[in-house]
Amino acid sequence: MFGTLTVRVGTAARGALLVGAYLILLATGALGWVAGFAVAALAAVAGEFAVERWSPATTALMEKAGLGLGYRQLARDGSVVLLVVAQVQLVGGELTLLLLLPATVWVIAVFAGAFRRIIDRRNPGGSMVRNIDLGRLGAAPGLPRWAAALTGDRLPWVNVLLVPASVVAAVAGTVGPVHLAGALAVGLAAVVGGTVGLTWLRGRGTGHGAQLSAVQRWLDGYRPEVALYFAGPAKDAYQANMWLGPTEALDRRAVVFLRNRDVLPALADTRLPVVCVPPGADFMNLDKSGIRAALYPANAGENIHLLREPGMKHVFLGHGDSDKAASVNPFCRVYDEVWVAGPAGRERHARAGVGVRDCDVVEIGRPQLAGVRGGGAEPGNRPFTVLYAPTWEGWLAGDPFHTSVALMGERIVAGLLATRPEVRLIYKPHPLTGSRSSRVRAAHERIVQRIRRAGGDVEATTLHGTTHRVVTGSVPTLVDCFNQTDLLVGDVSSVVSDFVQSQRPYVVANPAGLPDDEFRRAFPTSRAGYLLAADCGELEKIVAVTRAGDDPMTEARRELKSYLLGPAQADPMDRFAEEVARLCRR
């Protein structure tokens, strides 16, 4: 905490010194103090370079305070004019020219910045599609790197030439040096502005508009029936990834719609055609009238851009059934149907009373779990393996019990590492762990360091071998980890629900210390699991019992599986395909 405070004070101090240099620059210019002006100008210019290179936080702070680079450069140019007026006797049109030259640079900067944005929109950054041949499309020409670096607020930097020229002019008593420097600055700005203008002219009729037209032609020819729609950010791409396999397996023409270009590289490998159209107006203008079923893995504001289409059925799939409050979001009322895994999901919506009608809830199982190995974990030359897969801190501020990481995580990991005979630990936290809480992030980092000291691989990309693992990437997948796991330790989350597919023992953390009966009533997924209090006192005993195979929860897990995930004899992929086909026929 002290370190954080020190950093903030340092950032504010650097910003104050830089602003102070500009204030002194204006004051000495108005008073005609040449020496003071020269020192303040040197401090201001050097300070700008220093904060840009070594203290981006200072730059961001000044932007928030309304003292952005543009205003600071206006102050610099204004101080030049003040100094010359104070020290040089101006005659005729000399004052007009003194004002006109730096102003011309600013006019060029404004227009160059505007046309730069038009050029950027023609090529919105990266490909818009995957697994689609749009034919030969001419990409709009982009700005040379040097020109792109000088557009916008950066272009008036050429007026820095006026600063030494104004000092020379003040000492010599003539405005000539400033006029000369100003003409040179205008010439440099004109070169940049001309390059931007020519690039804009060369790119007319190409780029983003042409790509959109090609995408529409492809949609008209392909005529997709099913759309998997994801509007979330790249960090949430796992929510879409879990539905790629089931959607790809459908005997229907399907397409993936993305709304954030950063998701494209985070999207898992798939044979499905993928279309990414970030601007809302562009996406809504695409003709999608042939689509019959739109599938949504997550709630997002930009879902409205597809929900507004009346000719298709809109289905909320979610990204995992769990007892968390997020699984029964009132926003789900906007969809035609809500698909859940089993009876537990249906009852969860009925209990929550958020307005989702029972007739709109459809049980389809969990087609993603086809790869989960039932019975014993995958055989191999390895110790008894425990997977610790906690959830993240969630969106509700002030809820310390959403995740076990901060309150229990270190004790859980320390206990497992100290267990004898030795167990192998796989630590796979939720992808968003620590993204909202510095306390959770710090606990997670201490857990990783503890596993590192125990000889574990803290950047694991494979589960081969006998050492401990920290898995924070998309590979190995959660299903891969399940298949190597003899005992799961988790939180109230869909991880526990999905692990029930394996029928192997699991532990649910109870950081709030609720009585066992109350906890199991509130969170039905824990009914067939062992409960772990915040002190983790029972952890060693649970590991010993499950390792010995003397597990009293076996029958309870069998009953819970049908409740959570649907009938054991039903193939969830077949069920998913049947429901999609029903919507397409309608």
Image (spheres, helix red, strand yellow):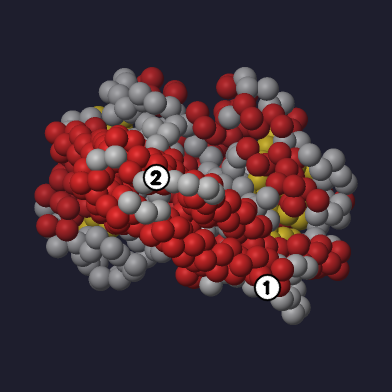
At a point 28% along the width and 63% down the height, the residue shown is 459
Residue receiving disc 1: 139
Q: Amino acid at mark 2?
A: Gln
Choose between 375 and 303: the one closer to the eye: 303
Residue 43 in picture, x, y percent from top left: 23, 48
Choose between 123 and 418: the one closer to the eye: 123
Residue 97 in picture, x, y percent from top left: 52, 51
At a point 75% along the width and 40% down the height, the residue shown is 307
Q: Residues within 10 Å of mark 1 (few under 14, many from 20)?
A: some
Residue receiving disc 2: 89
Q: Residues within 10 Å of mark 2 (few under 14, many from 20)?
A: few
Q: Which mark is residue 373?
A: none
Left or right: residue 24 compared with residue 201: left
Residue 47 in picture, x, y percent from top left: 26, 49
At a point 55% along the width and 37% down the height, the residue shown is 563
- Looking at the rendered structure, the secondary structure element under dot 2 is loop
At a point 24% along the width and 60% down the height, the residue shown is 458
Left or right: residue 227 compared with residue 494: right
The quadrant holding residue 157 is bottom left
Left or right: residue 12 compared with residue 274: left
Q: Amino acid at mark 1?
A: Ala
* Distance from Cα at disc 1 to Cα at disc 2: 55 Å
Label total for image: 2
Reply above or below: 105 against 334.
below
Q: Nearer the viewer, mark 1 or mark 2?
A: 2
